[in-house]
Image: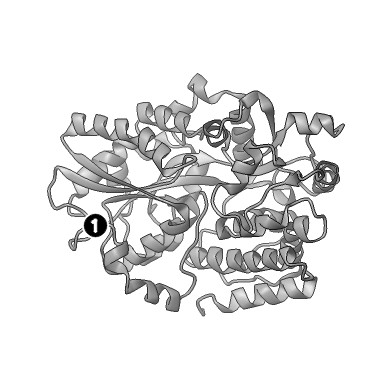
């Protein structure tokens, strides 16, 4: 999934409910038009801007209306707002008929009971479960339960690097380990340019990278029985290593501590940063005028060796799922819309537009998805990516830990020491915000 800011704890969620009318995005009947000829749809911001998403989606929604007679009222919601909006809707009942969610939220939102379960009967309505790549179904809800959402776009992280900046610095190949990345980053951080971009004020980006670093340190944020475990030596070392890219290694600009959605992509496209860690960035970079020949794409670095399973995990299993609110007044139309979005033809169109990978087997074979960038992403998803925890408290985890890391980046930017003790204290505070078991 991409870029979020969420309600972390019960008190925060409750405070949001006072704004339910403003945030619900729909009518008092749950956000959906009661007419069987109308649907409301919250799409996540996948492109470089909301306007680009509207341009991508508008002709497809018109196509659906022509085929079915059902008009879709579209709202593209920024990732900084999406989870808050969804949490409000699940509690107030004022949500859309159909919505996009980050795949890592599936189990959390499933636990609210607000989303339509995709049992065998519902899967049959959209062509069957066996159409989907098996690995992507692992991020659709808690194990042993019917999925709460359907895979729509698949992604993984990759390392994007500026070829000219590398050549000018005498660097002949992209880094394969973090030590190499730091060494290269120091050579590249000069004359107002920086080695690597980051979005320190983006809790979602923070948690995605912290998760990968934790895996590489042999650590998890949750125990086998689902309890939060944010202060183990491995997790603390992982978070510190990530923040130290700014605090100690000084290859990330201090101003990046205040960066939110897409700002690091913009800096990379403008040549301000030589490297970028991002999910499926090709379309985003193209929209900002960066030619594909100007950069290379490589796997995200590991501690040592090459990307693979176990401690050489180098990406989360990223992606966007589509879900249906169970209280929709138009469940039949909503199901038809999900079938349309996940059809072979639409999967090719939408995933090509967003330079993501179709989670549909038949659509993946299209020549549009055999480019070098897609090869890196597909290989990562197949060999070295791991799913974020599919636990009921996952959204609270993302918010609590992602926000803790935001504070650590702020410390680094202000010149305050980021130590093992200060990292552990921040993670301890984040763990205290988690629901009590």
Residue 400 at x, y percent in the picture: 56, 69
Instruction: Classify mark 1: helix, strand or loop.
Output: loop
Relative to 92, 342 lies left or right: right
Q: Residue 362 appears in which quarter of the rendering?
A: top left
Judge by depth and name the residue closer to the eye, 364 or 11.
11
Residue shown at 40% from the left, 61% from the top? 109
Taking the spot 46% from the left edge, 53% from the top edge, the residue there is 79
Outermost residue toward the front? 191
> Can you tell which quarter of the image residue 163 is in?
top right
Residue 142 in sight here: no
Is 62 in front, or is 211?
A: 62
Query: In the figure, 17 relative to 298: above or below?
Result: below
User: Which residue, as the protein is rendered here, is positioned at the far left?
Assistant: 35
Taking the image as shown, residue 37 lies to the left or right of residue 249, namely left
Where residue 260 appears, as percent x and y from the top left, is: 56, 55
**Point 73% across, 41% down: residue:** 307
* Residue 153 visible somewhere in the drawing: yes
Snapshot quadrant of residue 383: top right
Indicate the position of residue 190 as horizontal and vertical percent values: 82, 44
Q: Residue furthest top?
A: 367
Q: Nearer the viewer, residue 225 or 248?
A: 248
Q: Residues within 10 Å of mark 1 (few under 14, many from 20)?
A: many
**Residue toward you, 333 or 413:** 413
Q: Percent from the top left, x then y, of residue 113?
A: 33, 64
Q: Is residue 210 above or below residue 420?
A: above
- Image: 258 above or below 280: below
What colour scheme governs how the chains and residues are painted in the rendered image of this protein? one colour
- Location of mark 1 (residue): 26
Looking at the image, which residue is at 66% across and 72% down? 427
């Amino acid at each position: 999934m991409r870029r979020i800011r969420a309600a972390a704890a019960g008190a925060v969620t409750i405070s949001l409910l006072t704004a339910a009318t403003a945030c619900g995005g729909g009518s008092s009947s749950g956000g959906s038009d009661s007419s069987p000829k109308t649907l409301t749809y919250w799409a996540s911001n996948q492109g470089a801007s909301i306007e680009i998403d509207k341009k991508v989606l508008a002709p497809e929604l018109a196509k659906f209306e022509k085929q079915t007679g059902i008009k879709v009222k579209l709202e593209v919601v920024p990732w900084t707002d999406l989870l808050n909006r969804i949490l409000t809707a699940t509690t107030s009942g004022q949500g859309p008929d159909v919505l996009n969610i980050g795949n890592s939220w599936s189990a959390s939102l499933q636990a609210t009971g607000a989303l339509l379960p995709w049992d065998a009967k519902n899967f049959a309505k959209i062509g069957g479960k066996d159409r989907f790549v098996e690995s992507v179904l692992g991020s659709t809800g808690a194990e042993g339960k019917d999925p709460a959402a359907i895979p729509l776009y698949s992604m993984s992280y990759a390392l994007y690097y500026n070829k000219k900046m590398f050549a000018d610095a005498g660097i002949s190949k992209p880094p394969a380990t973090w030590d190499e990345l730091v060494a290269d980053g120091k050579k590249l951080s000069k004359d107002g340019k920086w080695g690597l971009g980051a979005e320190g004020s983006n809790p979602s980006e923070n948690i995605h990278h912290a998760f990968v670093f934790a895996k590489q340190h042999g650590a998890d944020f949750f125990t086998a029985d689902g309890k939060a475990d944010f202060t183990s030596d491995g997790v603390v070392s992982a978070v510190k290593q990530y923040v130290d890219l700014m605090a100690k290694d000084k290859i990330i600009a201090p101003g990046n501590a205040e960066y939110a959605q897409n700002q690091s992509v913009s800096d990379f496209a403008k040549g301000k940063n030589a490297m970028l860690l991002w999910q499926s960035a090709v379309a985003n970079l193209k929209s900002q005028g960066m030619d594909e020949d100007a950069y290379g794409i490589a796997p995200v670095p590991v501690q040592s060796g090459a990307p693979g399973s176990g401690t050489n995990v180098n990406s989360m299993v990223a992606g966007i799922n589509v879900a249906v609110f169970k209280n929709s007044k138009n469940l039949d139309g909503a199901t038809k819309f999900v079938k349309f979005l996940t059809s072979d033809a639409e999967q090719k169109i939408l995933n090509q537009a967003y330079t993501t990978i179709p989670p549909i087997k038949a659509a993946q074979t299209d020549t549009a998805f055999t480019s070098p960038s897609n090869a890196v992403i597909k290989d990562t998803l197949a060999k070295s990516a791991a799913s974020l925890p599919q636990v009921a408290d996952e959204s609270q985890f993302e918010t609590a830990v992602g926000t803790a890391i935001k504070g650590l980046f702020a410390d680094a930017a202000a010149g305050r020491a980021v130590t093992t003790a200060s990292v552990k204290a921040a993670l301890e505070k984040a763990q205290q915000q988690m629901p009590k078991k």
